[in-house]
Image (cartoon, grey):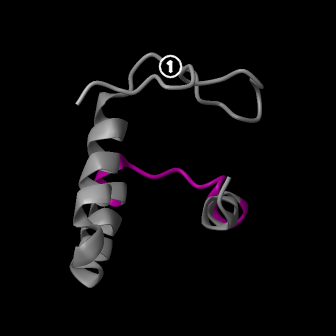
């Protein structure tokens, strides 16, 4: 796992946010880093399409999707 993800989890992992908040941050990032727009848009589609999958990394060691599996785009 990347250092940025771990930093985010450590600093803000207990906060409750809405997806609207996340979208605002993603838009801010896209405006500052337009070269990453495709990756941000792909990430947003992934998050929008992940449903009914347990992603609690602290509670369940075998979590999320199977390797190679992707959310529908």
User: Residue furthest toward the top?
Assistant: 52
Q: Name the element at disc 1.
A: loop
Position of residue 4 measured from the top left corner of the image (x, y, whole percent): 61, 67
Task: Residue 8: name its quadrant.
Answer: bottom right
Q: Is residue 11 magenta?
A: yes
Residue 39 position (above or below residue 53): below
Q: Is residue 27 left or right of residue 53?
A: left
User: Residue furthest toward the front?
Assistant: 68
Q: Is residue 19 magenta?
A: yes
Disc 1 crowd, CA 10 A, few/some/many (<14, 14-19, 20+): few
Position of residue 62 measured from the top left corner of the image (x, y, whole percent): 72, 21
Nearest the viewer among 14 and 38 is 38
Residue at the (56%, 25%) spot, across then down: 67
Nearest the viewer among 48 and 2 is 2
In the rendered image, which quarter contains the C terminus?
A: top left
Position of residue 1 measured from the top left corner of the image (x, y, whole percent): 68, 52
Residue at the (53%, 22%) spot, across then down: 65
Residue 53 position (above or below residue 45): above
Looking at the rendered structure, the number of numbered marks drawn on it comes to: 1
Q: Is residue 28 left or right of residue 9?
A: left
Q: Is residue 53 left or right of residue 40?
A: right
Residue 63 position (above or below residue 57): above
Residue at the (76%, 35%) spot, across then down: 58
Read off the residue under disc 1. 53
Position of residue 22 measured from the top left corner of the image (x, y, whole percent): 36, 57
Task: Residue 54: name its quadrant.
Answer: top right
Stretch in magenta = 10-21
Residue at the (68%, 66%) spot, across then down: 3
Task: Residue 34: name its quadrant.
Answer: bottom left
Residue 11 position (above or below residue 73): below
Nearest the viewer among 36 and 14 is 36
Nearest the viewer among 61 and 9 is 61
């Amino acid at each position: 796992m990347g250092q940025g993800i771990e930093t985010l989890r450590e600093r803000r992992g207990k906060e409750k946010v809405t997806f609207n908040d996340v979208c605002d941050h993603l838009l801010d990032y896209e405006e500052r880093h337009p070269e990453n727009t495709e990756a941000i848009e792909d990430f947003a589609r992934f998050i929008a399409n992940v449903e009914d999958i347990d992603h609690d990394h602290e509670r369940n060691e075998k979590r999320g999707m199977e390797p190679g599996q992707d959310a529908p785009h």
